[in-house]
């Protein structure tokens, strides 16, 4: 069977939730794909903090990187994950939360008067100034909203993820403009 990476990854997660640990060979057999493909799927899931690779097998991540904050996304109302949180500090002292840079960049349209806009570097987990960051849009790493938008403090890091997982690297202004035009197009 031929399946899109995202569909395979969801299937892998569903199996792992039931069976705890599955060898990479078994996953390759079940899905009818190569060991290499399974490794790549597991790398995506590992980067998203959902799965760990252990001695030729995969298991659900026990480290809980996918923790949620107590906040709700002001755009889509989803709980804001720690991993991708986006925080807009407005000039009136209000804090507006986005679940990920996708929603965060769109929320900036509603809140143009900001003092500080922070988001989390997807690779290192540090909070960074959103205006100085780079954004990987449309990669295979689907951690939150679609289109997937991941933030990196360094352009090189963003490009490295792009090589592995596809998509386009844009700076803050371009990423923002790109998302706004797509969002409008989908309405
Ligand atoms: Zn959202
Ligand atoms: Zn999101």
Image (cartoon, rainbow, N blue to C red):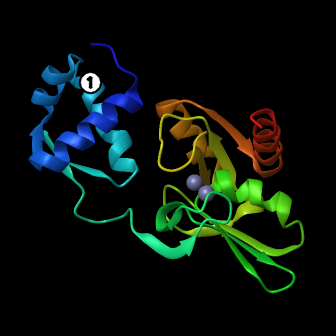
Residue 155 image position (x, y, % from top left): 65, 47
Total marks placed: 1
Outermost residue toward the top in this view: 1
The quadrant of the picture occupied by the N terminus is: top left
Instruction: Please indicate whether residue 2 sits to the left or right of residue 117 in the image.
Output: left
87, 161: nearer the viewer: 87
The front one of 170 and 68 is 68
- Quarter of the picture for ligand 2? bottom right
| Residue found at x 86% / y 85% | 92
Describe residue 176's horizontal placement relative to residue 25 as left or right: right
Question: Which residue appears at 49% of the width and 55% of the height?
Answer: 123
- Where does label 1 land, which residue? 36
Q: Is residue 148 visible?
A: yes
Q: Is residue 106 above or below residue 62?
A: above
Query: Relative to 24, is 125 on the left or the right?
Result: right
Q: Residue furthest right?
A: 113
* Other residues around mark 1 within 10 Å, as few (<14) / some (14–19) / many (≥20): few
Q: Quadrant of the C terminus?
A: top right
- Decide: is 67 above or below 13: below
**Above/below status of 116 relative to 16:** below
The answer to which image quadrant residue 68 occupies is bottom left
Residue drawn 87% across the image and 81% down it: 91
Q: Position of residue 32 (x, y in %)?
A: 20, 16
């Amino acid at each position: 069977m031929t399946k899109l990476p995202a569909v395979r990854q969801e299937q892998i997660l569903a199996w792992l939730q039931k069976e705890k640990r599955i060898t990479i060979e078994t996953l390759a057999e079940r899905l009818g794909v190569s060991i290499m493909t399974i490794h790549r799927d597991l790398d995506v899931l590992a980067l998203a903090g959902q799965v760990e690779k252990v001695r030729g097998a995969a298991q659900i991540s026990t480290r809980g990187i996918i923790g949620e904050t107590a906040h709700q996304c002001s755009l889509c109302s989803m709980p804001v994950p720690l991993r991708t949180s986006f925080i807009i500090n407005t000039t009136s002292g209000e804090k507006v939360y986005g679940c990920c840079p996708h929603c965060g960049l769109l929320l900036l349209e509603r809140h143009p008067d900001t003092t500080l806009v922070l988001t989390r570097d997807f690779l290192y987990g540090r909070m960074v100034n959103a205006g100085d960051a780079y954004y990987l849009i449309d990669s295979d790493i689907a951690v939150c909203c679609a289109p997937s938008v991941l933030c990196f403090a360094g352009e090189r890091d963003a490009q490295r993820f792009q090589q592995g997982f596809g998509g386009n690297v844009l700076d803050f202004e371009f990423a923002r403009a790109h998302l706004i035009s797509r969002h409008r197009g989908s309405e």
